[in-house]
Image (cartoon, grey):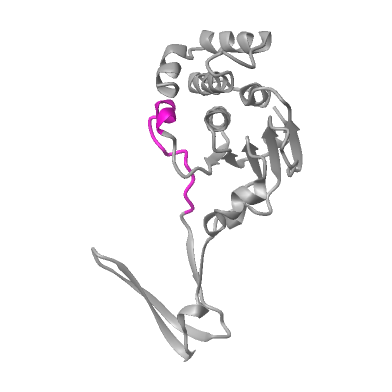
Amino acid sequence: MEQTILESKNIYLIPGSNIEAISSTLALFYSLKETGKNVNIVLDSLPEELQFLSPTLDFVSYPKNFVISVPDAVAKISQIYYEKTPENLKVHLTLDSGNIKKDNLSFYFSEVKPDLIITVGVQNYTKTLTEKLDQYAFLLDSPILNVDNSPENKNFGKINITEQKPLAQIVLGLIDALPQNACACLLTALVDYTNNFKKNVTADVFEMASKLMKNGANLEEIIKNILK
């Protein structure tokens, strides 16, 4: 395992948008969880064809600390209270001085910065994250381990592991623990990368697929779900 991963406790995973990237990221998630890491995945939703890999969506990270900010130069606030009804939540501010307009307010999510961000199958980190800044701006300054197999990768990470081979193969080299659900995810990534072993097939690919199946990955179930 990369020393950087070993030294990190709080890790965020950001996958690319395709099946290979997401399933490889899921494998990394399950493996890091097995070693006691606090891990979250930045993912809007799990594609339908990959839902068999996870019984729940608890691994998906949705920021929970929402902040409403009022500049002190605009108004002095002496009291805050809220009113909750079945229909909505109202936040009441008592002003000592000043006047608040809608344009004075700012809204954002605030979370603890992770020790490490690992991107998997992401070619351009800035472009990927820019679309999510309202939710994930707290990720901007964290160190990045960039894992990818595309020659178009921008090498944006503090550490860049960019090799033209299956993402599953690269990810397997990063992990120590290999629980059964991680094996299923890695084999899913291999099936997608090789189009069910019809292209990009090497002896290493077959050897890895065999190892994953011996550790409990069900090839028939994977093909049924992602190629249906």
Give the answer, above or below, for where 152 lies relative to 211.
below
Is residue 92 shown above or below 6?
below
**Residue 24 screen position, x and y as percent:** 57, 28
What count of labels does the image hold? 0
- Front residue of 140/225: it is 225
Residue 124 occupies quadrant: top right
Quadrant position of the N terminus in the picture: top right
Residue 103 drawn at (x, y percent): 50, 79
Which quadrant of the figure contains the C terminus?
top left
Q: Residue at x 48, y 14 (%)?
A: 217
Placement of 196 over or under 27, stated as above or below: above
Report the side of 8 relative to 30 (left or right).
right
Looking at the image, which residue is at 49% across and 66% down? 67
The front one of 90 and 217 is: 217
Residue 115 as seen in the image, left or right of residue 210: right
Q: Is residue 34 visible?
A: no
User: Residue lying furthest bottom in this view?
Assistant: 97
- Does residue 214 show up? yes
Q: Is residue 52 magenta?
A: yes
Residue furthest left in the image: 86
Look at 61% across and 12% down and name the residue there: 208
Range of magenta residues: 48-63
Left or right: 13 with respect to 202? left
Q: Is residue 96 above or below residue 175?
A: below
Residue nearest the viewer, comparing 80 with 217: 217
Q: Main secondary structure of the magenta part?
A: loop
Residue 211 image offset from top left, x and y in percent: 58, 10
Task: Answer whether residue 72 is magenta in the image.
Answer: no
- Residue drawn at x 56%, y 13% is 197
